Image (cartoon, grey):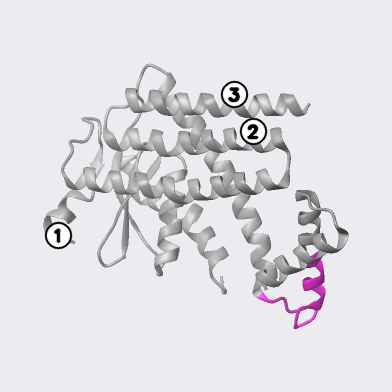
Amino acid sequence: MFALNILLAIAWTALTNNLSWFNLLSGFALGYVILYFASEGGLTERPTYIIRVIKAFGFTLFFIKELIVSNFKLMAEVLTPTHYMKPGVVAIPLDAKTDFEITLLANLITLTPGTLSLEVSPDRKYLYIHAMYVDTEDLDGFRNKIKQDFEKRLLEVMRDEP
Amino acid sequence: MRDFLIILLLIFGTFLSMVSVLGILRLPDILMRLQAMSKASTLGITCTVAGMAVYFGSVEISIRALFVVTFLFLTSPILAHLIARSAYRSQVPLWKGTVCDELRDKIKEHPQS
């Protein structure tokens, strides 16, 4: 479905004879609308692709926001004279199963505020991350936050059924 | 307006790269230094490349900029991960303020895996 949408966008760009980012994007949006109406199951039953595009878009926005927040946090830590960090290594239980999902999750964790993925356990049940601000009283809360914020959203985009 | 955007992107990108260097110098242990390196330099280079794409404004250059950013986002975390993993396994001491460590005992159980 995604390939079809890209193809429609390229066809639109070629037919309107105007190669620019704006035109390519409007071609993509138009192709998306066409697929929305032409997809099997009519208007009541949407195939997963239609929903996943919306989720992927939201996820990208969320990721950009997290990336910028992480940079400002780091900047504050580096540029002020005192260190407020409470670093620690924490194990996060994994729901992601395939190599691709785990790789994406690990990359995502590295790029988001205060966390760096360190190691995957040999049985792929845990991901060990190094975090800058760990509250030792509430380790489970910290684990849950990572799972809810990143893993759940990522898997929603990656997998067919939620 | 466009000049202003270019200047803003370039200054912010350079500033972030500088923060990343300062972070490598100032933070106390290797894992935190890697955090500084992987985050600040990624967004720093992204901003610089985006400034370049806006400056030239052509599709050809923009596609190249998009590729640069994509590969950067794929490779930079992997680089940080590999360095962090090997540093941790060769028992580089962590900062004295480290509050918890759940991996040390696991590695003792399976040193080769």
Labels 1 & 2 near each other (Cβ < 8 A) = no
The x and y percentages for residue A115 are 39, 43
Question: Which residue, as the protein is rendered here, is positioned at the far right?
Answer: A16
Residue B72 placement (x, y as % from top left): 49, 46
In the drawing, what numbered circle is on residue B51? 2
Chain under label 1? B
Span highlighted in magenta in the image: A30-47
Please name which of the two marks, 1 or 2, marks the residue nearer to the observer: 2
Specify the amino acid type for callout 2.
Gly
* Marks 1/3: CA–CA distance: 46 Å
Q: Residue B90 appears in which quarter of the rendering?
A: top left
Give the image location of residue B49, x and y in percent.
59, 37
Residue ID for mark 1: B112
Q: What residue appears at the point 12 percent right and 54 percent down from the top-left corner?
A: B108
Locate the C terminus of chain B and report the quarter of the image it occupies: bottom left
User: Disc 1 to disc 2, how far (Cα)?
Assistant: 46 Å
Quickly name the residue at label 3: B11
Query: Split into 4 quadrants, where in the image is the N terminus of chain B?
Result: top right
Upstream in sequence: badge 1 or badge 3: 3
